[in-house]
Image: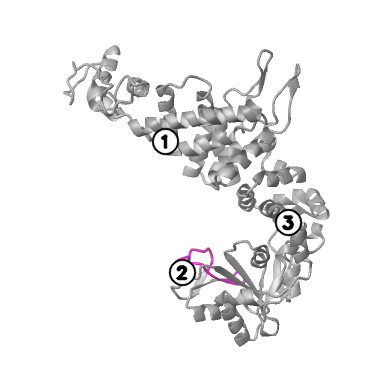
Amino acid sequence: MNFTETLHSNPIFEVIARQAAALDVRAYVIGGFVRDLILKRPSKDIDIVCIGSGIDLAEAVGRELKVPVIVFKNFGTAMLPAHADQTTYTEATETVPGSRSLGWEVEFVGARKESYRSDSRKPLVENGTLEDDQNRRDFTINAMGISLNESDFGQLLDPFGGLDDLRRKTIRTPLEPKITFSDDPLRMMRAIRFASQLGFDIEPDTFDAIIEMKDRLAIVSRERITDELNKIILSAKPSYGFKLLYHAGLLDLIFPELLALKGVETIEGKGHKDNFYHTLQVLDNVAERSDDLWLRWAALLHDIAKPATKRFDPKVGWTFHGHEDLGAKQVPGIFRQMKLPLNEKMRFVKKLVRLHLRPIALVKEQITDSALRRLLIEAGDDLEALMNLCRADITSKNYDRVKKHLANFDKVERKLRELDERDKLRNFQPVITGELIMEAFGLKPSKEVGLIKVAIREAILEGTVVNTLEAAIPFMIEEGRKMGLEPVKELPIQADQSVSHDSSSPESPQ
């Protein structure tokens, strides 16, 4: 198979070939770019291997293209970043100045062979041949190369049958799989990640080796494991990857909380659904609606506290009361353990886990403005994500039941939109703050201040008080007087003004 015409369509390969010839080194494009080129998948990264100094070749290419070159001296590699301002790399130096953007990230490395110690996945590296370099690749589909040399430009080099494995949709290691996984145990996660991303099978001997070598994953950093896990979560059908993780024995090592959902218990003829497979179905359902990683994490964690809250009631069967609140409390710990960000991403997941039953509860009862108003305020800008999660949470095999629930969700969403357009309650905050209450009654931070704040908030949410100073200050004074408090200063609204219930006001939540 020859890719001459395809390579000529991207000028960067001609530049690399020209500079490699000038330096008298042989160069090849190798790995994921070749795989994706054959599969006709989009690719953003190009890996170049040369028989010689990858750094020298990168600098020569950078000079001709007038783009910056980032050198990683400790690793003997260099990179042309996709964008000219992409210069933040640990232990890297920019050796060739430039301002042009390529749109591709191109990494250069000299061909090498590697050897590993049993207690580390960091190899001992020495110069090698192209064959040595291909031998060290993780899978046959990633070990294919294309020549950039004048004598055989565009020719596919496929020593391990990667092309046939692509056609068979098979993940297989180029060398004996136990050696491949023992050398670098992260490759076990990568095997499952590629299978999940591409919809491929893992060759039986390769999968058996993962099962046998799974404990080697202990030497891999949590950050690298989570990076692969996130890529599985972002697959088109992530449940496939998680089922492979489960059957390989890796899931118990990296995410035991999820595996704890598995299984069905039956008492007095009453059983519950298998919450592990339900969760994976919810994750797949969300994946059909959104490519947002954090919404997918919310799907993965929405029922995470069910094992801890499972109870059997002889009258109603199995219950999981409070699993949404306990699950929300578990989210920060799981994120910390997984080395995921403890910022607004975590708070978004925590919020959705806590609220995921609220819309479902609304479809089962007569919908009041008060209940809708509370949901609208608590969800804020994340309402659409919450509703996506709730729709995905309907996994019944009963078509009529699913259709009924979805129709009810349509009704809830319509009412929420109408309420939001009318009252502008997203990210609502009461106009009366704790500072104003303390100033009005001459109080320090205290229980009374909290009670008055709660009373005002509840009155606004119930629609009995409009969220304006004109309405809320008289109500605040009333609540203070119930506790024996009197204003200590003149307020913008007279203390004897009655509490407003004017539902005709344009700002009224009624």
* C-alpha gap between disc 2 and disc 1: 38 Å
Q: Which residue is mark 2?
A: 84
Res. 271 visible in picture: yes
The residue that appears at 64% across and 33% down in the rendered structure is 395
Q: Is residue 109 above or below residue 490?
A: below
Mark toward the start of the polypeptide (1 vs 3) = 3
Q: Position of residue 149 (x, y in %)?
A: 67, 82
Q: What SS does tag 2 mark?
A: loop
Mark toward the start of the polypeptide (2 vs 3) = 2
* C-alpha gap between disc 2 and disc 3: 38 Å
Q: Position of residue 376 (x, y in %)?
A: 42, 31
Report crowding for label 3: few under 14, some 14 to 19, many 20 or more residues within 10 A (C-alpha).
Answer: few
Q: Position of residue 4 (x, y in %)?
A: 65, 77
Res. 117 visible in picture: no
Mark toward the start of the polypeptide (2 vs 1) = 2
* C-alpha gap between disc 1 and disc 3: 48 Å
Q: What SS does tag 1 mark?
A: helix
The residue that appears at 16% across and 23% down in the rendered structure is 490
